Image (spheres, rainbow, N blue to C red):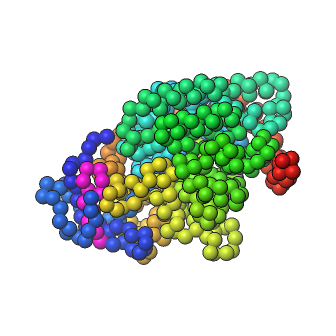
Amino acid sequence: MVKATTHTVIRGGRMIDPGKRQAVAADILIKGDTIAAIGRPKMAAPQDATMIDAQGRLLHAGLINAHMHSHGGLARGLGDRWTLELLLTAGPWLGGGRTVRDKYLSALLVACEMLLKGCTATYDLMAEFPTPSVDGIDAVARAYSDAGLRAVLAPMTADISFFDAIPGLMDRLPPALRREAEAFRLAPYRASIRQMKKILHGWSYDRALVRPAVAPTIPHHCSDPFLAACRDLARDYGVGMHTHVSESKVQVIAGYQRYGTSLTRHLDTLGIVGPDFTVAHGVWLDHDDMQLLGDKGASVAHNPGSNMRLGSGLADMRGMLERKVNVGIGTDGASCADNQNMYEAMRLASFASKVQGPDIERWITTDEALHAATVGSARALGFGDDIGRLAPGCKADIVFLELAHPNWMPCNDPVNALVHAEDGTAVHSVMVGGRMVVENRKLLTVDLATLAREVDAVRERLQRATRPAKAVCDRLEKVVGAFCPGLARQPLHIHRYGANHAH
């Protein structure tokens, strides 16, 4: 990324103060990539400072996406009535046939969307089959660097296929279809660990902008030796660890059947749960799980849009906050949540809490939703307090909203409006690390017209290349679509009681 000029001063804007729920007139002085001072209008600034006129603009800290999948960019809109398990079944079709260039384009596409919609950092769990590759990860990291978006890049890895991970599912497949499913088996875990070690050891990108992490995809899709090896890698290289936990009821039941305890509790027995650990979704976490996560300083990436889109359920964000869990907010991937709009994700986090019961004290407030989508997500990404706030010492990741836009007429409570009224259409400019990457609604780092032409050509090629995989997935869907809902209809307490009784 090109370095910003030594000093920049933003004058004439109004800055959201979440604590006071006001939009206060303020100037911001930036030195390099960091906010040096925030003061009253016309505050002193070095004579050589570059001046940005923010008259008529509302400023807020860049939103931070706590969980998404860049490989979903090229698979946007390919499915409708999918549960999580049907989405996983479709994985070889959705992500098949990808070249290294395709992986770059898919990440660049979602990076552009996030920047244009006020998001300045993301936690990306991208996937490659049958194991992560150095070239593939480098392509995705380069896409984020080229776009100018901060990212934590955690390649999803597993050593147990979806069909083997759900007890009884492989046995339900007819012999011919079982042979097809067996082709989806993943590489032995040692091969994936070797690849991950190469990626971590050879990381060449500025970690203040693009950093690596480790992501065993779903606990019961990974053998215990594999999970332990991922844990050790994360510790050895000082990076975060992120996995999908209790996203669907099927996952929870599979976990009890396999481990005799909850997925969270099992991960804790392996020494994985801690301050650098993030749970994705957590829809079906029970209060004991939440308490464990809170006690250990772990995070949950709450993805309300995807959870509703896939019929997974409504996560109890209030229960998590009560138990001191750090909660961030994410969009999930474009193949299962369709857009990467963090304004919408905040709004849905607020709304999802309000349909779970009439007790308004348990509803998520707009300042809690905003805090989760900024400060909470920053901590989940491992950036601590460096991003997610507009304050001296923080990175200058700033979104400029157009106050003359209908979304902001009138500007009453700006926190309520940011969460409930803003949808990304009022984004005027976006700064990441003191550098403008979006200005006057135009992305400065990527030629979108060229990107659109290349993406459309890739779409046509992938449609042809993945036709056989789609045919297999369509046949597998019929079995998965009958078996997994049947499993999910079982009362959860039967599995909990059986597990506890057995011990």
Residue 450 vs 113, above or below: the answer is above
* For residue 502, above or below residue 455: below
Q: Is residue 348 left or right of residue 22?
A: right
Q: Residue 48: image x %, image y %?
A: 14, 54
Magenta span has 335? no
Residue 492, horizontal then vertical, whole percent: 81, 54
Identify the residue at the far left of this view.
47
Q: In the figure, residue 440 lies in which quadrant?
A: bottom left
Disc tally is: 0
- Residue 207 visible in the snapshot: yes
Horizontal and vertical percent position of residue 94: 61, 35
Q: Residue at x 46, y 59 (%)?
A: 375
Foreground residue, 85 or 8?
Answer: 8
Q: Judge left or right: residue 348 versus residue 256.
A: left
Horizontally, is 151 left or right of 300 in the view? left
Q: Is residue 32 left or right of residue 419?
A: left
Q: Position of residue 8 (x, y in %)?
A: 22, 55
Residue 476 quadrant: top right
Q: Is residue 340 visible?
A: no
Is residue 28 found inside the magenta-colored segment of the image? yes
Q: Residue at x 74, y 28 (%)?
A: 181
Of the 4 image quadrants, the one containing the N terminus is top left
- Determine the residue positioned at 48% across, 40% down: 238
Q: Residue at x 83, y 55 (%)?
A: 493
Residue 415 vs 114, above or below: the answer is below
Q: Main secondary structure of the magenta part?
A: strand
Q: Quadrant of residue 424?
A: bottom left
Q: Which residues are magenta?
A: 25-35
